[in-house]
Amino acid sequence: MKSYVAPEYIVERDPDRCIRCKVCVNQCSYDTHCYDEEEDCMISKSENCVNCQRCATFCPTQAITIRPNPNQYRSNANWTQEVLTGIKKQAETGGVVLTGMGCDKPNLTYWDRILLNASQVTNPSIDPLREPMELRTYIGSKPDKLDLELDQDNGVVLKTKLSPQLQLETPIMFSAMSYGSISLNVHKSLARAATEAGTFYNTGEGGLEKSLYKYGDHVIVQVASGRFGVHPDYLNAGAAVEIKIGQGAKPGIGGHLPGEKVSEEISKTRMIPLGTDALSPAPQHDIYSIEDLRQLIYALKEATDYTKPVFVKIAAVHNSAAIASGIVRAGADAVVLDGVRGGTGAAPRIIRDNVGIPIEMALAAVDQRLRDEGIRNQASVIAAGGIKSSADVLKAIAFGADACYIATAALVSLGCTVCQKCYTGKCPWGIATTDLWLTKRINPDIGARRLAGLLRGWSLEIMEMMGGMGINAIESVRGNRLLLRGVGLTDKELEILGIRMVGE
Amino acid sequence: MVVTDILNRVPENLILKNNVALIDATGVYYRDLNDILRSLDSNGVEKVEICNVYGQRYIGTDLDGHISIDIYGTPGNDLGAFMKGANITVHGNVQDGCGNTMDHGQIVVHGRAGDLVGHSMRGGKIFIRDDAGYRVGIHMKEYLDKRPAIVIGGTAQDFLGEYMAGGVLVVLGLNMKGEIRHNARFVGTGMHGGTMFIRGEVRHLGEEVAVTDLTEEDFKLLKGLVDEFCEYYGLDAEKILESKFNKLIPVSSRPYGNLYAY
């Protein structure tokens, strides 16, 4: 069948600049470029290009330009290029249109319509460069009250037994990305950067590779419906355990690592045979209710002898607040909310772009509900899904989050250009791939440095913004919605977000 | 032996003699019971007998040694969840989630089992003398020398071996009279690995399952498991093996390979 799908991009090469060094040929994993020996010229097959910009970045003479294909169908607000292309693709394959990364539609973001406050004249601002700033955060269940006692020397002794806590030096953690969806070198980079920055990285559901057990104090191990690589040593290797119920990019559906990506290394860590599909069912089959969830939470607490906090991660959906209340009452130490813009290695595009709700709304509703019920202290709340700057982190914390998870931002710091083709397994940046030829493009030493640089940069920015507000501890920002104002939002939106309009 | 806090808290419920511990679980909360077991396990106790068990959950979870536990009564959900090496015999019925994500070890049940026997188990063996509930062996998997096995003496309910990715599942139907026809539906839905041996016929199979005859090698594997089963329950293996068995295998290791438009 002749395909009617037009190339998305056009690769242009400046013949005066091109030195025929073939760097582009070697860098592209989609076979876009080739060298014609007879003619001594470079040829580009635009139809293969995904616009990842790898060749353009590495071209020593900047000879390559990639542009959206100027041949566009007649413009139409409803029948857009994306809609038409999707339909043609489906007609030709009869399949579900896949995509990668988070939702790319602009109308689902609230962060940019929410503004932070700063001090002027009264409550003077603080200069974080010269005064101490506290970003340290503890994730875990906090007691309803503290019992204290004076000892013989009049020192204060804490009598309350505290639940296990994670200590974060900055309220930013690396979100779950499984080994298999991303490469070992990326996991190594994340583990090292988390260790260096005093924060945590999440394994995702693909298990923890043996060589990374040594970073266990900075690892959150995930238990998802596939239970891949989940065994007692794994559960005890990390500092916390996360039960994955859902993911913002694909609420309500399972995961599916295609057999092509289950290489020898992946098979070892996931503990499944080489080349078989790794299917994560949509539900966890031992959880059909909040009571069942409690059972798994406590099974994991038993398996780790009550030494580690247990997180429960859900996709932000319409009734997240009620669900989060159930999760807290089920005994979770932290609730993770993953908004509609959360990333993925592969998801049906129709689900990514149409299912779930923005993290801002879910976070505001959940925090308020837990406060109203008087159980907010019983669990930490972690916001995830589309956190793209330090301002988003600070706004999330002002909404009530204890910390944020980032993943897309972390990958972008490693080179990702958000081309949304992760599901092909051919990531030219060596990130979302298990092909050993490509994975070596990420050097864990450099990767860790880039990630740690990102965390440091964002942390400095958070301190600057806090200082500007006259606040010297992140604890004073947490749940302090007076620091936020909305712009261009309806009354109802402001009401749900629990914030005032700018100027009010 | 280091006697931990917990042993001091419930001394009247525990008798320790010659490295054998006897526990009276009457009124003991599951967390305390499992705490006692962990403490005994880490102190090298090799055999534990627990009587009057009424629904205490997670027995056998987080035990590292090769401790053997005899349970009298009805243990609660998630018996042996995430278990790594213990050897449990239940003189009674078990509830849901027996052997959930079990890694290694053995559970022998002299009675019935609830739903989700061996959910996602990756190693070890589970023997159920009588019937089991829904979704037995769901998402069982295997890797190299880790090949889990479940043998059900009676019959099992719908979604037997759903999403099965590895391991061996045997259903004997010993308590069924006349022509053996298991009433379960959607057996092996989403199956993409592993093997089921069913004595008799199945009412309704999932789309992803094929039925074949046993090879000589299959029979050897089945015989080993049936022999072991019969040893625990005092039954005649030869007689059981005379019956017709069906072998259920996945049609493909990639049942959902062509769902997507790339």
Image: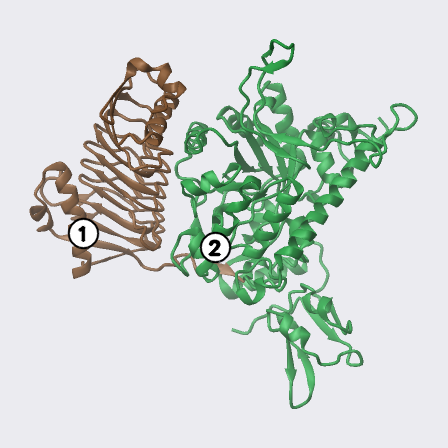
Same chain for labels 2 and 1? Say yes or no.
no
Q: Give the class, few, some or many, for how many residues have Cα within 10 Å of label 1's Cα (few <14, many ≥20).
A: many
Q: Chain of mark 1?
A: B
What chain is colored brown?
B
Observer able to see residue B173: no
Task: Label 1: state its secondary structure.
Answer: helix
Q: How many numbered marks, from 0 up?
A: 2
Q: Nearer the viewer, residue B148 or A247?
A: B148
Q: Chain of mark 2?
A: A
Q: Nearer the viewer, residue A197 or B261?
A: A197
Instruction: Say if B223 sits above or below A316 in the image.
Output: below
Q: Nearer the viewer, residue B14 or B147?
A: B14
What is the three-letter code of the residue carrying label 1? Leu
Q: Quadrant of the N terminus of chain B?
A: top left
Label 2 vs label 1: CA separation?
32 Å
What is the three-letter code of the residue carrying label 2? Leu
Residue on which the image places disc 1: B222
What chain is colored green?
A
Point out which mark residue A257 bears: 2
At x 56% / y 25%, what residue is drawn?
Answer: A141
At x 35% / y 31%, what residue is drawn?
Answer: B42
